[in-house]
Image (cartoon, helix red, strand yellow):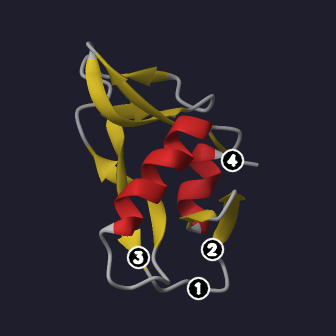
Amino acid sequence: MFNISEKAANEIKKLLLDEDDKTMFLRVRVVPGGCSGFEYEMGFDNEKSDSDNVFKKEDIEVVIDRFSFEHLEGGTLNFSDGLNGTGFGIDNPNAKASCGCGSSFTV
């Protein structure tokens, strides 16, 4: 399971309004890198593979490939628009540690 907060779903909807291709969805990936070993990548995509995991909230989709889902299972995609930073973030119960800036993690 992977959760999508209400704020994240609403922000994805807003961003998708600017896209010409109405088949787009948000793809979330875990890739090697960052100061802690892994980092998150997010971006719009319109191609899925049979091994992708698809999570829906209202009328938006978040797609996660098999490798990434192993590191994100049970997590929650959030959106913050507060004074301490604006943007998407992931509450990841599988992360054993993260870097100071919060953009990379260790499993």
Q: Amino acid at mark 3?
A: Asp
Which of marks 4 and 2 precedes in the sequence? 4
Dots 4 and 3: beta carbons under 8 Å? no
Tell me the SS state at disc 2.
loop
Which of marks 3 and 4 precedes in the sequence? 4
**Is 69 left or right of 78, judged from the image as shown?**
right
Q: Is residue 58 visible?
A: yes
Crowding near the residue tagged with mark 3, few <14, some 14–19, many ≥20 C-alpha atoms within 10 Å: some
* Disc 3: which residue: 45
37 or 58, nearer to the observer: 58
* Disc 1: which residue: 49
User: What residue appears at the point 28 percent right and 29 percent down from the top-left corner?
Assistant: 86
Q: Which disc is residue 2 wearing?
A: 4
Image quadrant assignment for residue 62: bottom right
Tell me the SS state at disc 3.
strand
* Disc 2: which residue: 52
Residue 3 in percent (x, y) is at: 68, 43
